[in-house]
Image (cartoon, rainbow, N blue to C red):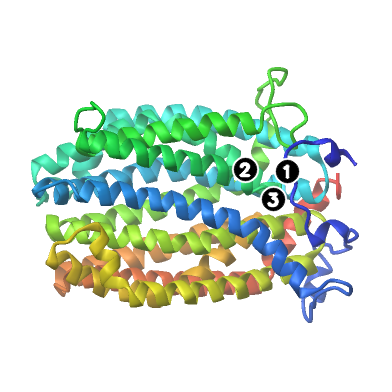
Amino acid sequence: MEEKKTRTRIVRTTLDRLPYGDYTAENVRERKKGIVIPEGVHRRELVRDVAIIAWPSLVELILAQLTSMADQIMVGRIPGEAGVQGLSAVGLAMQPKFLLMTMIMALNVGSTAVIARYRGQQNREKANQVFRQALLMNFMLGVIFMVIGRLSSGALIRMMAGGQNATIDAATLQMATNYLNIQLYGFIPLMITFTITASLRGIGDSRVPLFYNTTANVVNVIFNYIMIYGKFGCPAMGVEGASLATDIGQCTATVIAICSVWGAKRYVGISFKDKFRFDWEIMGNVVKIGLPAMIEQVLMRTGAIIFTRAVSGLGTVTFATHNICMNIQAMSFMIGQAFAVSSTTLLGQSLGKRRYDMAVVYMRITRIVGLCVAVFVGLIVSIFRSQIVGIYNSTPEVIAAGSGILLLIGCSQPIQGEQFIISGGLRGAGDTRFSAVATAITVLLIRSGLANLTIRVFHWGLWGAWIAMACDQLVRTLLMYYRYNSGKWARMALKHAESKGGTE
């Protein structure tokens, strides 16, 4: 088979030894009940399939978030008031960056889903065509977004701080603007790396992204130490040094990522012989799945910006505490996101092979394993909450407020993990529109609306904001659960395969 000639590692799963299924968009409605593990397939094999994709993704995501934590911890350890100012500055700068960055990340959802489907069909040529189109599209968008960000960075930071009603001091605002401007210079390499990572995940390869992203994280932390504090003859650059160190680490990851897919014998690869021309049909398939995901991320980030503006009005110290809690919560996100990679890949490949039964079974196993891990993480966060906050900043006021919020974060872990895993499965099926609608309802109306109500009307302070976030997570999880149980995602994916001529 053609796959044996490729040099990129292909993750072999139980699905590979099963025959093609006979599910269609018509008969899946009648046959969706009573699905059990196919004869000859053992539960431990399925757990292995989930774990072999999830664990490298989990390690990669955790290391990436640890690096982000290291940025904030090292900035927070700058002596005097500059440490608290630096924490607030990084928090202000990251939201506009995430808004631009996640738009392209969301488009890559389409790449992962389509490549996973072609991997299930064992169609390497089509998978490579999608990969090249994704690289071309994301590179161009990366250039556009970088320029837009550089031209509007100052205005974005002022908006994040509350505009004319900002209570954050001018020095912090300038730090945040400088941080964002430096970050935007590394935007194009970041987008290339995201595209390669998304494509490799589509074929089930999560170990290569683990390698180059881990290398980038190590480089980032080393240069953080050198540039923030001024070591080995380098001037002490503070917050700007942390931003520049991130760019250096990201460029390192991009170089290694390109090398990992370079060569005609890679399963998804590029070479000098490739012609990068727009293929509107392929790009249309990617955008059809990725565009709703992008809209979802724009809505989510818009809600996050409104949410952050509401919290920033509580003052510099409270906002610094909020950013610490957000950073720790983002670490806990990694658990759900790692298992979401498994659900996206395995469900997409199963539907590409017309094995709706395997898609359901894989999702069931992923949710069970993910729940167990989420409960464990929730206990750790709840028990050691004060110590975790103290790593960032030793101010008693920050530790007291932050440890209470972390208890809420710990209790919400199972709900949060369930949401990520189900959403990942829906993305693997190409069902991304519902998620965009659900996000609009929960982030814009529930999180942002409740946060402004509890902070500005009820005067609950930081607790009001985090109660609003918990309500957002709960309602969104219930909506995702409803969508998955409806089975519409399978009929959509199978109908699309039929319109494209079966297994191609």
Q: Quadrant of the C terminus?
A: top right
What amino acid is at disc 3? Gly
Q: Nearer the viewer, residue 482 or 348?
A: 348
Residue shown at the point (19%, 58%) measured from the top left: 319
- Whether the residues at callouts 1 and 2 have beta carbons within 8 Å, the answer is yes
Mark 1 = which residue? 9
Residue at x-position 45% and y-position 71%: 377
Nearest the viewer among 341 and 353 is 341
Where residue 456 sits, quadrant-wise, is bottom left
Residue 327 against residue 145 in the figure, above or below: below
Name, please, the residue furthest toward the bottom: 34
Mark 1–mark 2 distance (CA, rounded to whole Å): 8 Å
Q: How far is disc 2 from disc 3 in space, using C-alphas?
A: 10 Å
Q: Label 3, on which residue? A: 204
For label 3, count other residues whose C-alpha is less than 10 Å away and answer few (under 14), some (14-19) or many (20+).
many
Identify which amino acid the numbered label 1 is placed on. Answer: Arg
